[in-house]
Amino acid sequence: MGDRGRGIPSRCRCGEDVVLRTSKNVKNPGRLFYACRCGVENVRGHLFRWTDETMVEEMEDIFPKIEKLEGSSLTLQKGVQAVECEMETLAIETRTCESVVSGFEKELLRLENDLQGCKMELRGLKNILVCVLLMTLVYMFLL
């Protein structure tokens, strides 16, 4: 039962648990009610509430909570949609970056191959220079 004494009760004001009983009087035969297990018929101070009335109160109190939950749910759905859109954008950007990286890797491989070619050419030029120097030295000693 809520703070205002509305809805389905669980305890009496005296602290005892509430029980569900059936009316046996002529005015309300078979009507269900909540009562304190320690209460005595026609004694004020202990809980007595008709179940149909408590159910109506319970429903009246729960409708605003349901509306609030529905509003929160819509807000969350919009947030999820925004996150999903952002994820799609990031996936596209990731594919673009992967493509750029792949291009850089190919360019790097091509530059490494060019560098290897330049090193081989440089070794060849170095060998030619050494040969020219040796031939120049031999030529100078022979003259």
Image (cartoon, helix red, strand yellow):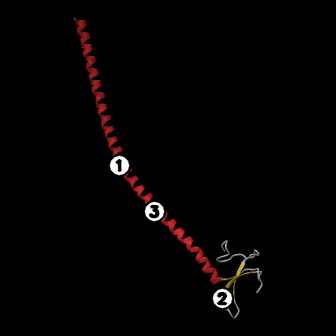
User: Which of the two residues, 82 or 121, is positioned nearer the viewer here?
Assistant: 82
Q: Amino acid at mark 1?
A: Thr
The vertical placement of 71 against 49, above or below, is above
Rate crowding at label 2 as few (under 14), some (14 to 19) or many (20 or more) other CA atoms within 10 Å: some
Task: Name the element at disc 1.
Answer: helix
The label number, if any, that marks residue 96 in the structure image: 1
**Identity, as a three-letter code, of the amino acid under mark 3:** Lys
Q: CA distance from mark 1 to mark 2?
A: 72 Å
Q: Which residue lies under the disc numbered 2?
A: 31
Residue sitting nearer the eye, 1 or 80: 1
The answer to the question of whether label 1 and label 2 lie on touching residues, with beta carbons closer than 8 A, is no
Residue plotted at (71% across, 78% down)? 18
Q: Which mark is residue 78?
A: 3
Marks counted in the figure total 3
Q: At numbered mark 2, what does the secondary structure look like: helix, strand or loop?
A: loop
Q: Earlier in the sequence, mark 1 or mark 2?
A: 2
Q: Residue furthest top?
A: 143
Q: Residue at x 31, y 31 (%)?
A: 115
What residue is at 34 percent from the left and 47 percent from the top?
A: 99
- In the image, is 61 to the left or to the right of 73? right
Residue farthest toward the left in the current orientation of the protein: 143
Residue 29: image x %, image y %?
Answer: 67, 92
Quarter that holds the C terminus = top left
Q: Is residue 143 left or right of residue 13?
A: left
